[in-house]
């Protein structure tokens, strides 16, 4: 009997052959609602050959060069056949039945995205993730993990969440400005909420996240990761915040934060700040596109 094509599972991959070998069968075992698509981001570890040989039932899309997470998932969503797209990282194993509760939210046409609950294995412990808090503090947008006791969330993770493709495309998808990683899912969630769409966290949709196996931690120095995170925090603010009082507080606090970074030897914040500055033309161009969808104020969201 032919499967009902009502969901596409998209998996971005970069040199994750060992992760695909370890976790992909778990994803396939719960994918009876539709297709599984792996988008390869210019891997050099024979991931593509491995997939074609061992998983012929998986659609494989190969990019010519490595770009980063946002660009890769944009390709995957564009290629997806279903309007509901589930993004799963290569270090994820979903529990049986995780799709049912995840997809139930999409009966509401204003729902853009729903986050899974990550049982994240970190340092020998299991941390429950998937729900996020965000607020404005001393001129900066700040976020952290929230307790998994409510369905409201400030953003959904690009590593284990479901998205409505039609809204994704209307908003322009994830922004490649955030390549290679970090903040792209927070940015897309914020833009969706500012445009009047809804995002939720679903605690009954459970995935296991082997966080320390992920390619970011395996392939990048911690100082570079920190620099990119700082850079993308500035990009997010300059691209999305339109409230005049919040922008003035950012202008006031930024030189203070830079001086504090100098005093504490945190040169990575300064490097990240300058890396964001050189991207100002692209940031403002992206801001202009996003502003066409703005319906809610920043204070409504924060």
Image (cartoon, rainbow, N blue to C red):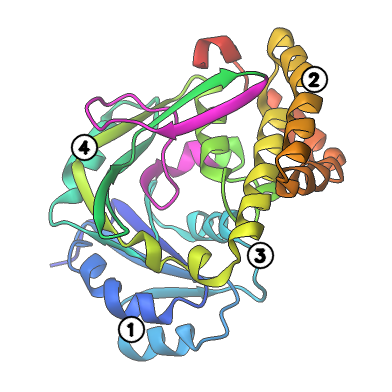
Mark positioned earlier in the residue sequence (4 or 2): 4
Front residue of 183 and 54: 183
* Of 285 and 219, the residue lying toward us: 219
Mark nearer the viewer, 1 or 2: 2
Q: Is residue 158 highlighted in magenta?
A: yes
Q: How far separated are the C-alphas under marks 1 and 2? A: 53 Å
Q: Earlier in the sequence, mark 3 or mark 2?
A: 3
Q: CA distance from mark 4 to mark 2?
A: 38 Å
Disc 3 crowd rating (10 Å Cα; few below 14, some 14-19, many 20+) is some
List the residue tagged with mark 1: 56
Q: Horizontal and vertical percent for residue 86?
A: 36, 51
Crowding around mark 1 (Cα neighbors within 10 Å: few <14, some 14 to 19, many 20+) is: few
Measured as percent of width and height from the top left, residue 154 is found at 44, 27
Q: CA distance from mark 3 to mark 2?
A: 31 Å
Which quadrant of the figure contains the N terminus? Answer: bottom left
User: Residue 222, percent across and down?
Assistant: 58, 60
Instruction: Give residue 22's mark.
Output: none
Residue 90 seen by the camera = no
Residue 251 is tagged as 2
* Left or right of residue 217, residue 119 in this image: left
249 and 71: which one is in front?
249
Q: Is residue 15 visible?
A: yes
Element marked by disc 4: strand
Q: CA distance from mark 1 to mark 3?
A: 25 Å
Q: Which residues are magenta?
A: 139-168
Say whether disc 1 or disc 4 marks the residue closer to the N-terminus: 1
Is residue 105 shown left or right of residue 293? left
Q: Where does label 4 land, which residue?
A: 203
């Amino acid at each position: 009997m032919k499967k009902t094509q009502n969901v596409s599972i998209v998996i971005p991959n970069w040199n994750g052959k060992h992760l695909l070998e370890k976790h992909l069968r778990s994803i396939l075992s719960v994918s009876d609602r539709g297709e599984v698509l792996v988008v390869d981001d210019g891997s050099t570890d024979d991931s593509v050959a491995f997939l074609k040989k061992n998983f012929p039932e998986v659609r494989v899309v190969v990019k010519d060069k490595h770009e980063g997470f946002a660009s890769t998932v944009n390709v995957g969503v564009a290629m997806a056949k279903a309007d509901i797209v589930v993004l799963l990282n290569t270090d994820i194993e979903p529990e049986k039945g995780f799709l049912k509760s995840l997809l139930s939210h999409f009966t509401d046409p204003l729902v853009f995205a729903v986050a899974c609950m990550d049982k994240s294995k970190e340092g020998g412990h299991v941390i429950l993730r998937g729900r996020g808090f965000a607020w404005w503090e001393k001129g900066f947008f700040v976020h952290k993990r929230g307790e998994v006791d409510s369905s409201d969330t400030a953003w959904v993770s690009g590593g284990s969440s479901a998205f409505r493709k039609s809204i994704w495309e209307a908003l322009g998808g994830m922004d490649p400005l955030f390549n290679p990683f970090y903040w792209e899912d927070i940015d897309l969630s914020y833009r969706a909420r500012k445009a009047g769409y809804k995002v939720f966290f679903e605690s009954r949709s459970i995935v296991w996240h082997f966080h320390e196996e992920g390619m970011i931690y395996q392939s990048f120095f911690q100082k570079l990761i920190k620099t990119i995170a700082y850079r993308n925090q500035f990009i997010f603010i300059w691209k999305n915040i339109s409230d005049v009082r919040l922008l003035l507080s950012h202008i006031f606090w930024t030189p203070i934060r830079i001086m504090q970074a100098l005093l504490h030897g945190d040169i990575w914040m300064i490097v990240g700040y300058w890396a964001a500055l050189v991207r100002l033309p692209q940031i403002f161009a992206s801001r202009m596109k996003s502003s066409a969808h703005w319906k809610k104020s920043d204070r409504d969201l924060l």
